[in-house]
């Protein structure tokens, strides 16, 4: 796997400090400028890029992020071309992936709902601008500031818009979705909505389904569906009814009808049976929060 050397200069102004992570077709680095500012920088790995598709997705992610400006979405700085490769520079977020919190077991219900509410705030902003994430999962969410002396509350940042779907005015501004084709499933199998798993047309409700999966996981410490391989996940999302919170968590006083309605509504198989928007789901979440014992 080809990675950038520590100390390498990119675009004449960014110096590579360290590797933050890599996966799929790209890598992420911490970089610094001459005046001491620090950023994160994404690039497609040349030995993993499939005919330039990863680079094209990186460019579309950069364009999509330019449409967004929200405290719970990572901010884009610029897209840099250097040596025939593209580099997306974004704000550097000091935090840890939401998935690391889940590894420790279920979160207290109020904390889980606060996190989910921030995700819905971010999605409402993106959806209102014609941007659908469609690969929302714990590893694409960073949690920051939890438990600090000045701010004891969690703050989330949604990352990685590499599989973004653009609609309406956003598609007109950035360009049509030429990277996808009907009949092809895009997303992470454990969090993918049924219509996406089937390769059907999708809209913003695929993101709300993913929030439902994440919220179920935050509350119970497990995914609603468990499978041995990606195909098993796809089949479960399409054809297996999701378990109730009460069945997964047991007889807990916090498993209220309002909370069951929230998670069940997000995990409905048919998009028409889900919440119509992030704002509608957030209102239901607020009701569930107030109903907690």
Image (tube, rainbow, N blue to C red):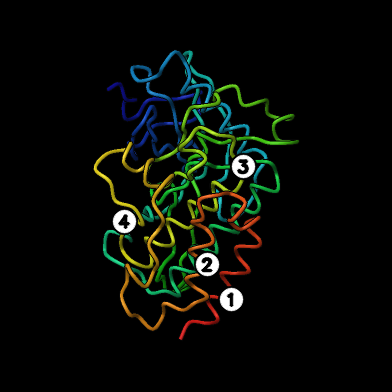
On the image, the x and y values in percent for residue 211 come to 49, 55
* Mark with earlier residue (4, 2): 4
Q: Marks 4 and 2: which is nearer the front?
A: 2
Mark drawn on residue 287: 1
Q: Answer with left or right where residue 70 lies relative to residue 88.
A: right
On the image, the x and y values in percent for residue 164 come to 56, 36
Q: Disc 2 marks which residue?
A: 262
Q: Nearer the viewer, residue 148 or 122?
A: 122
Q: In which image quadrant can residue 129 be found?
A: top right
Q: Marks 3 and 4: which is nearer the front?
A: 3
Q: Residue furthest bottom?
A: 293
Q: Residues within 10 Å of mark 1 (few under 14, many from 20)?
A: some
- Per the image, label 1 sits on a secondary structure element best described as helix
Q: Quadrant of the C terminus?
A: bottom left
Q: Disc 3 marks which residue?
A: 203
The reply to whether the C-beta atoms of the residues labelled 2 and 1 are less than 8 Å apart is yes
Q: Quadrant of the N terminus?
A: top left
* Mark with earlier residue (2, 1): 2
Q: Answer with left or right where residue 102 lies relative to residue 121.
A: left
User: Up-down: is 129 above or below 289?
Assistant: above
The reply to whether the C-beta atoms of the residues labelled 3 and 4 are less than 8 Å apart is no
The reply to whether the C-beta atoms of the residues labelled 3 and 1 are less than 8 Å apart is no
Q: CA distance from mark 2 to mark 3?
A: 19 Å
Q: Residue at position x 30%, y 75% from top?
A: 250
Q: Residue at position x 52%, y 67% from top?
A: 262
The reply to whether the C-beta atoms of the residues labelled 4 and 2 are less than 8 Å apart is no
Q: CA distance from mark 3 to mark 4?
A: 29 Å
Q: Residues within 10 Å of mark 4 (few under 14, many from 20)?
A: few
Q: Disc 4 marks which residue?
A: 100
Q: CA distance from mark 3 to mark 1?
A: 25 Å
* Mark with earlier residue (3, 1): 3
């Amino acid at each position: 796997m080809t990675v950038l050397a520590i100390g390498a200069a990119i675009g004449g102004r960014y110096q590579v400090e360290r590797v933050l992570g890599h996966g799929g077709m790209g890598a992420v680095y911490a970089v610094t400028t001459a005046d001491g500012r620090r950023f994160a920088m994404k690039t497609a790995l040349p030995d993993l890029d499939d005919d330039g598709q990863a680079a094209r997705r990186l460019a579309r992610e950069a364009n999509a992020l330019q449409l967004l400006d929200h405290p719970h979405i990572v901010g884009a700085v610029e897209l840099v071309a250097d040596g025939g490769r593209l580099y997306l520079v974004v704000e550097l977020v000091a935090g840890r992936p939401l998935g690391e919190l889940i590894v420790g077991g279920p979160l207290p219900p109020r904390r889980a709902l606060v996190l989910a509410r921030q995700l819905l705030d971010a999605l409402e902003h993106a959806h209102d601008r014609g941007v659908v994430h469609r690969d929302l999962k714990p590893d694409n969410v960073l949690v920051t500031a939890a438990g600090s002396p000045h701010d004891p509350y969690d703050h989330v940042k949604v990352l990685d818009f590499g599989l973004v779907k653009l609609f309406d005015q956003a598609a007109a501004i950035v360009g049509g979705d030429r990277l996808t084709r009907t009949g092809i499933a895009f997303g992470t199998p454990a969090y993918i909505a049924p219509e996406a798993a089937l390769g059907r047309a999708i809209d913003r409700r695929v993101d709300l389904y993913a929030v439902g999966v994440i919220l179920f996981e935050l509350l119970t410490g497990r995914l609603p569906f468990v499978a041995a391989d990606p195909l098993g996940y796809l089949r479960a999302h399409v054809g297996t009814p999701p378990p109730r919170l009460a069945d997964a968590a047991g007889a807990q006083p916090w498993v209220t009808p309002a909370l069951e309605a929230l998670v069940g509504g997000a995990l409905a198989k048919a998009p028409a049976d889900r919440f119509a928007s992030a704002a509608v789901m957030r209102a239901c979440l607020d009701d569930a929060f107030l109903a907690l014992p």
